[in-house]
Amino acid sequence: MAGRVEEINTDILQKCREQAGLDLPDVEKKVSKIAEIEAGTHSPTFKQLDTLSKLYSVPRWVFISEQLPTRYQFDKSVLVFRQFAAQRAEIFDNSKVRRLIARVERFRDLILELLDDMGETFTKFEPPKFNENINPESAAQLIRSWLGLTDDHLDFPGWKRLMEDKGVFVFLTSKYKGWSHIDNMLVRGMSIYHTIMPILIINDSDVKKAQSFTLFHELGHLLQKESTIDDWEFPRQREEKWCDEFAGNVLMPSTMFNFTRDEIKDLDTVKNIAKTFKVSFYACLVRLRQLSIIDQTTYTAFETQLKNEYAKMQKKLKESPGGPARNRSLEVLNQFGRIYTRVLFQAYHNKEIGLHKLMQFFDLKKPSYVFDLEVQL
């Protein structure tokens, strides 16, 4: 049959779906005949295979292999800090994400160009040098020292400012519909490595406490001189696991978990610990299990409670009439960050650019927004 693929390994197809944490009804939203395809009674089109490859985070050729390649075998027994998002059956809009990446790269180029015009240079990104075999915990200790931390527990804006102080351009996508909005929570963050002003892109549709984790996960890639945009469609699982553990150790060092198993009486106790570290409840739960402070039975029970609470929260958000009015100036400052904002205002005051150009660079239509932005800076 023209346009269809006949030699599909249905066992591999099913295994890829299951290890992605997806049920048939989830996948049917994107590929309506997935049950028939897995049963071998329906030959998929190339387009359907493309959809499945993105959904399962494996390249299309995997589905016609004799065995599932080791690289694409995801260990479901390994605890992950961001499980809720990984179970959503949505697809990247490849072109939109790539346009976003290209535009943020242009923002970086603009910063460097304006600094050069003003006769200034930008601080080189110089994190501690790592041995390539360094474990995540040791790497996290070095980074906390590099950031000047002792027993600090910061919120996301605090972590973001520390990254900016170290010469990292942190860009947040918009929560609102527009060119930088990414509704798909499978794209939680991306990193673009440069020796000068590397880029971290964080999805602002996520909750702030989860963004802190994403920030350090993506920093983990930068420390290894990696750009996750090179393989964000098909992530390398070993590197992802290292970055997950690294982020967990930065935010929740094992030396600060002075708790015993008897003290973790219920989920409220876990939530209180999470609030202390200013991380998500789920990330804290995973960390407690990793450190063997709670056993697998307790972990599973608490995880089920969290999933039920999360589902109720999502339903409530969908039914809510909306949030507070937008503050455009603060929104722009949060999105573009202090590096971009400061350099543009510096160029404006040095008469390198005019007010109209300044408004264009900030995507603001009213001069009053621009002046309010400088006050907030």
Image (cartoon, rainbow, N blue to C red):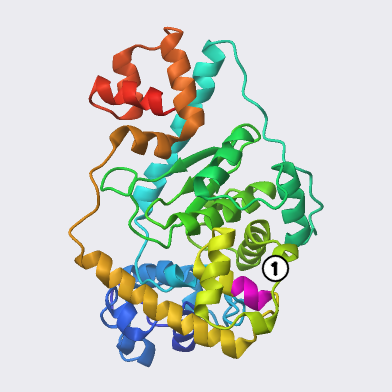
Query: Is 289 covered by the magenta stretch?
Result: yes
Q: Is residue 31 left or right of residue 211?
A: left
- What percent of the width, then of the height, locates residue 51? 36, 68
Q: Which x, y percent locates residue 75?
A: 60, 79
Instruction: In the rendered view, tell whether residue 79 sits above or below residue 184.
Output: below
Q: Which residues are magenta?
A: 286-290
Name the residue: 59% across, 90% down.
297
Using the image, determine if residue 75 lies above or below residue 234: below
Left or right, 277 with reference to 14: right
Residue 32 shows in this picture? yes
Q: Residue drawn at (25%, 80%), measured in percent from left and top?
A: 32
- Residue at horizontal 44%, vertical 77%? 306
**Would you say 107 lies left or right of 163 here?**
left
Q: Looking at the rendering, which quadrant does residue 160 occupy?
A: top right
State the count of labels.
1
The image quadrant of residue 260 is: bottom right
Q: Amino acid at mark 1?
A: Phe
Can residue 45 be seen here? no
Q: Secondary structure at mark 1?
A: loop
- Check the picture and name the quadrant holding the N terminus: bottom left
Q: Nearer the viewer, residue 148 or 37?
A: 148
Residue position for label 1? 257
Asked whether 29 falls inside the magenta stretch, the response is no
- Judged left or right of residue 230, residue 329 is left
Q: Nearer the viewer, residue 22 or 317?
A: 317
Label 1, residues with CA under 10 Å away: few <14, some 14-19, many ≥20: some
Report x, y in % for residue 128: 77, 43
